[in-house]
Image (cartoon, rainbow, N blue to C red):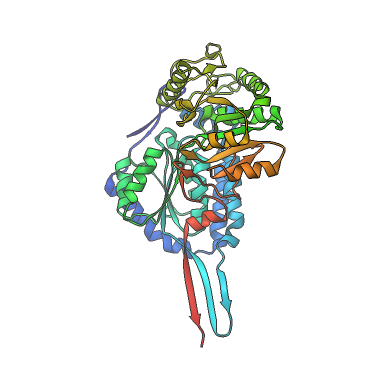
Amino acid sequence: MLECISPIDGSVYASRPVLSGVEAADTAAKLRAAQPAWAARPLAERVALLRAGLAKLTEMTDEAVPELAHMMGRPVRYGGEFGGVNERAGYMADIAEAALAPQIIEDSDGFERRIERTPLGVVLVVSPWNYPYMTAINTVAPALIAGNTVMLKGSTQTLLATERLVRAFHAAGIPEDVLQNVFLDHATTSALIAARSFGFVNFTGSVNAGREIERAAAGTFTGVGLELGGKDPGYVMEDADIEAAADTLIDGAMFNSGQCCCGIERIYVADAVYDAFVEKAVSIVNGYVLGNPLEPTTTIGPMAHRRFADLVRSQIAEAIAAGATPMIDASKFADDGGTYLAPQILTDVTHDMRVMREESFGPVVGIMRVQSDQEAIALMNDSDFGLTAALWTKDPARAAKIGAGIETGTVFMNRCDYLDPALCWTGCKDTGRGAALSSLGYQSLTRPKSYHFRKA
C-alpha cells in the first residue's frame, strides 16, 4: 500500500494498493495495443479531446484545492494549479499543427521528399508532488496530442492528484487504454523501463531517483527526459528596482514553503544596494503567517513531509554554527519542530555552507554581497545544478551578457519562478537533460521519419 501522510496533522489522508509486476506489465501492454488507433485519429480530434479534458479538470477546482492542502500543505488561499495547467496545455494545443507538420524538402514532378514526426508509442510520465498537476501536464498534454499513449505515475505524497487528472480526461472522452494512472513501487517501475515497455520516459524528481531511471533504461535505447534538482540563483544589480526585486525574489524563495522546482534558493546582491534589499526582504518574511493551510489567513503552510523540514533545519543550524546570521526570529512563527517550519533568511553565508550548495527545497534563502558582475557569475555557476537564474537590472544588454555566461537552462530578467510554455523548459548539469514544452517539447515526444519518393 502507498500512503499519503498529511503534513497538516500526520494522519493518513489517502492510501492505494500498488500494482503487481504482472498487472503493471498488462497495463503497459494495453496502452501499447491502443496506441496505433489513437495516433490514427485526426490531430484536430486529439486536440479537441485534450481541451475537453482540461475543461473537466477545471470544473474540479473546488474539490482539488483543499485536497492539495491536505496532501502537501499548500495554503488554500492560493487556489489550485489549473490556471497554469490550462496555460501550458492550451499553448501546446495551439501550436500542435505547426509543430507536428511535415517538413517538405521537395514536391516536384520527379520527387517527393519530406520529414514527418512519428509518435514514440507509450510514454511513461513520473510526476512529483510539489506541483502534481502542472508538472504532469507538461508532458501528458503534448504526448497525447502527438499520438502517444500515456502511463502516468504520480508521487505517493499526492496520490489523489494524478488519479483526479486522469479521471477528468476519461470523462471528456479520452479512452482508458490511451491514458492510465498507475500506482507503482520503485522496483516495478524500474522493471517496466528495463523491459522496454516505453518509447519515452519523463521524470521529475530528485537527482538520485533520476540516476535510477537512467540505470533502468541503460541499454534499452529508451529516450529519457529528466528534470532533477535545483539551486536557482538571483542576482540583484545596483540599478535594479529594489522593491520589485525583493518582492519577487522572496516570493520565489518562500512560495509553496520553498517547494518549487525553479524556486530561488540563493541571492547575490550588489554591494551598493545590499542593505536596502536585505531590509526589504526581512520585512516581507516577517509578515508571513505560518499555519494550517486550510485557514484562509495562512500565507505559508507546512512542508510536505517531516523529513523535508528536518533537512532544511539541519542546513540552517549548520550554517548558523559556521557563522551565518539568521535574520528572522523563528520564535515568532508557529514552528512545531515537525512539518511546520519557520521561514528563514540567512546573511553572512558562504559557499562552504550546505545551505548555499545543496538543494534545500524549503523556506530558506541565503543572501550574499557581491562586488562585480564577474563575481556574481562565478558564484551563480558554483553549483552542481542549472535550471533557472534571475537577473535584476534595468539594462537588457547587460542581462544578456551576464546570462550568456551562466550555466543554466533559463535566464530571467526582472522575474523568476515561472515556466513560459512557449520557451523550452530544460536544465543542465545535475538538474538533468531534455526539452519540455515549446515546439521542442514535441520533438522529444516524437521521432523523425523520412520519406523519399521518386515519382518517375
Identity of the residue furthest to the bottom in this view: 456
Q: Along the horizontal axis of the image, is 91 left or right of 307?
A: right
Q: How many marks?
A: 0
Q: Nearer the viewer, residue 181 or 299?
A: 299
Where, by quadrant of the figure, is residue 78 drawn?
top right
Where, by quadrant of the figure, is residue 266 drawn?
top right
Task: Determine whether 143 is above or below 103 in the image.
Answer: above
Q: Residue at x 60, y 43 (%)?
A: 403
Q: Residue at x 71, y 32 (%)?
A: 239
Q: Nearer the viewer, residue 48 or 230?
A: 230
Q: Residue at x 55, y 60 (%)?
A: 45
Q: Position of residue 451 (x, y in %)?
A: 48, 74
Identity of the residue furthest to the top in this view: 331
Q: Is residue 200 visible?
A: yes
Q: Position of residue 322 (x, y in %)?
A: 46, 18
Q: Along the horizontal axis of the image, is 270 left or right of 13?
A: right
Q: Nearer the viewer, residue 54 or 363?
A: 363
Q: Position of residue 114 (x, y in %)?
A: 53, 72
Task: Determine whether 198 is above or below 14 in the image.
Answer: below
Q: Give the quarter of the figure containing the N terminus.
A: top left
Q: Along the horizontal axis of the image, is 11 left or right of 418?
A: left
Q: Position of residue 256 (x, y in %)?
A: 54, 29
Task: Determine whether 224 is above or below 293 in the image.
Answer: below
Q: Is residue 168 visible?
A: no
